[in-house]
Amino acid sequence: MKIRLIEPISPSRHLWSKSYFVRLGLPMIGAALVEAGHDVRIFNPQLAPIDWADVYSSDVVGLSSTTSTIIEAYRIGDDLRRRGIPVIIGGSHVTFMADEALRHADYVARGEAGETVMVELAEALAGDRELGSITGISYWGEDGNAVHAPLHERCEDLDTLPFPDLTLVDGYERITNTPIMTSWGCPFDCTFCSVTAMFGKKYRFRSAESVVAEIKEKKPEKIFFYDDNMAANRKRLKRLLQLMIDEGVAVPWGAQVRTDVVRDPELMELMRASNCDFVALGLESVNQATLDSFEKSQTVGDIEHAIRILHDYGIRAHGMFVLGADHDTPDSVADTVKFAKRNKIDTVMLNILTPLPGTQQFEELDREGRIIERDWSFYDAQHVVFRPKQMTPLHLLQETIKANKRFYSTWRPVWAFHKWLWQRNEVRKQRAWDRMLEYGWLWYYSRTWWTAAKNRAQRRRLRALSKQQPQQPPQQKPRPASRVCEPGMVCEPEKQQV
Ligand code: B12
Ligand code: SF4
């Protein structure tokens, strides 16, 4: 069967517009489909343009999406269905918004196990299987009602999953930082994060042997481990890093970790020895009350300590912050940048708090009537979609843009250029070049944010909203029972307008 898979991108310019990172869901699904004998190509417009002539002649198209890309996925889904091509959408957004997604697709894949769902759907479309036998899928039943099959069981042994096949993605040669995922789920439960709702609180990880086999197969120059919390089990991470060193595949790598990673000197030594280049830290806030409200199990002291130790080991720290929580005041945003500069955090990502479907945060803000934006394309952590408690939405937006400008000041790319110019060591020279491009883009992005029509429109809207009195939260109504609302999942709000 001719199957095409598409990862749509956000409709307008955003923080990640210049990056070549693909999510691994489609390459993994693609690998499973090829194994089952299908003809597969994957498109991600960030890497290469979509070959529409090819897509329009396929037997079925699979779309993968997050909340900020879902509007584009729906647009593509509507177009394909008008042409009579069956469409299935999967990913973290539709897992929690299946009824909404069914208005733009024939099938919706909820939860994990996309690789099994897609292979089984292809069998069903070929007439070799009953649709009703597929778990984790939603579709329109013959009586015109939505059918939500129970979720597929969580994969207990990640070693049984196929290695994501990046070569199926058009333009994959542009991927310089090879993505590899070694674990799913996270034992923490931060209120704003949808990872645990999607992949569970149980930390599941692949064997070190399986990961090293994938590295050997892909022969990367650099690796970005996509794990949400790479060091949630330190013992297994130590085994993996040791094996990477022993097998001679310890290329420069980066990963997302928590600040607690620095508590283990043996692990830090192994990270250095295995060429850990940078870590992305979920720092979230420099306001302790906010950290506590996020249930982050982390103190401001932990953050300062972690940055110091990482730098001692020669590892760059990328700090990811979330701004606009109920305990944040207008000063909190500026304080974050001061803190980041004082502690010499190498790069920062200043995210505006974004209530994502599936999270406790979404539930709460929706219940309190504080969600002010229902266009999902604004749910990219660079726009304000809710009414903050201690400042106006416009204030939060403007302060965040200003803070970005303050952090990514002109001297950063200039300094990196200077280092590149005078550096004689080839590896360091390349690093300085990469830094210059990164800082240059973030400098440019933070200064031209307002020039995008979409962003100007949001500023106008927020300005108008900021003049209005906050509305009283609506009377709480019990949620209607819905078959799609399963344990750990949030039901769709009734008033969704997509
Ligand atoms: C790598 C990553 C990134 C990369 C690349 C992302 C990209 N190209 O979009 C970067 C760093 C650029 C990034 C940026 C952002 N990210 Co991100 N990211 C991830 C991360 C850590 C891994 C993604 C991945 O490969 N997962 C592994 C694969 C296997 O999972 P998957 O793609 O979901 O696929 C599974 C199922 O969903 C299903 N499936 C998926 N698609 C399909 C399609 C079909 C047809 C079928 C049948 C099944 C199916 O099958 C797979 C399992 O078998 C995830 C967290 C996570 N654990 O997934 C967050 C995550 C996807 N990101 C998230 C967010 C919020 C963002 C940002 C908005 C945040 C920000 N602060 O900037 C931006 C948005 C960027 C954009 N594209 O607009 C959220 C999305 C939640 C949501 N509801 O949308 C996640 C889930 C993390 C979280 N905190 O909750 N991200
Ligand atoms: S923010 Fe990080 S630590 Fe918290 S639940 Fe999500 S993945 Fe886990």
Image (tube, rainbow, N blue to C red):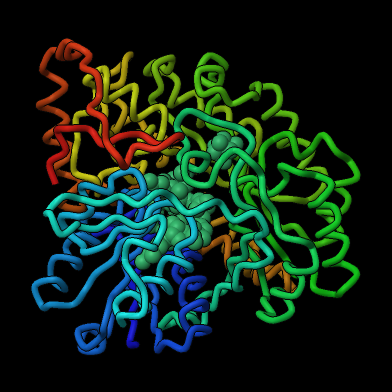
Residue at horizontal 22 percent and vertical 14 percent from the top: 476
Residue at horizontal 18 percent and vertical 11 percent from the top: 475
Residue at horizontal 29 percent and vertical 77 percent from the top: 125
Is any atom of residue 43 visible in this view?
A: no
In the image, residue 349 sits, relative to residue 169, either above or below, namely above
Q: Quadrant of ligand 1?
A: bottom left
Q: Position of residue 200 (x, y in %)?
A: 55, 42
For the residue pair 368 and 482, the one nearer the viewer reads as 482
For the residue pair 440 and 230, the one nearer the viewer reads as 230
- Residue 468: image quadrant is top left
Q: Position of residue 157 (x, y in %)?
A: 67, 58
- Residue 300: image quadrant is top right
Is any atom of residue 180 visible in this view?
A: yes
Q: Position of residue 179 (x, y in %)?
A: 58, 66
- Residue 292: image quadrant is top right
In screen coordinates, is 66 left or right of 83? Answer: right
Residue at horizontal 22 percent and vertical 47 percent from the top: 99
In the image, residue 495 sits, relative to residue 134, either above or below, namely above
In screen coordinates, is 74 left or right of 161? Answer: left
